[in-house]
Amino acid sequence: MIGLDVVLSVAEALHAEFREPHLAPPLLLLRMVEGNLLGRKTAAASTPTADGAARAAPDRPPGDPGGRSVCHSEI
């Protein structure tokens, strides 16, 4: 598991190398890293509530990817 700061760094490096628009880091990712919302391991992951306040993201059991896993053979 890696943090969003690492994802941002990789996206910036890929965009700098290949200059492809689809490789540019998304604005939301930039804002999250600037706001120090880096991921679960930093305890800074949060999800907004209806009133706009932030709450901690729920913990998932080990091995739970949090969504449907896609095998490379399905792509």
Image (cartoon, grey):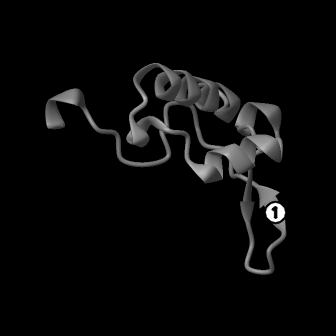
Q: Which residue is mark 1?
A: 54
Side of 12 relative to 18 (left or right): right
- Note whether 31 is above or below 19 in the view shown: below
Write the residue at 36% across / 47% down: 68
Write the residue at 73% across / 79% down: 50
| Residue at disc 1, secondary structure | strand
Write the residue at 64% across / 25% down: 6
Asked whether 16 or 51 is in front, the reply is 16
Residue 3, by quadrant, is top right
Asked whether 34 or 51 is in front, the reply is 34
Residue 54, by quadrant, is bottom right
Residue 75: x %, y % from top left: 18, 37
Q: Give, as a three-letter code, the residue at label 1.
A: Ala
Write the residue at 75% across / 31% down: 41
Tally of numbered tags: 1
Quadrant where the N terminus is found in the figure: top right
Q: Residue furthest bottom?
A: 51
Residue 62: x %, y % from top left: 56, 31
- Note whether 30 is above or below 7 in the view shown: below
Residue 44: x %, y % from top left: 82, 43
Q: Residue furthest front?
A: 19
Residue 31: x %, y % from top left: 73, 50
Structural crowding at the residue carrying mark 1, measured as other residues with C-alpha within 10 Å and reported as few (<14), some (14–19) or many (≥20)? few
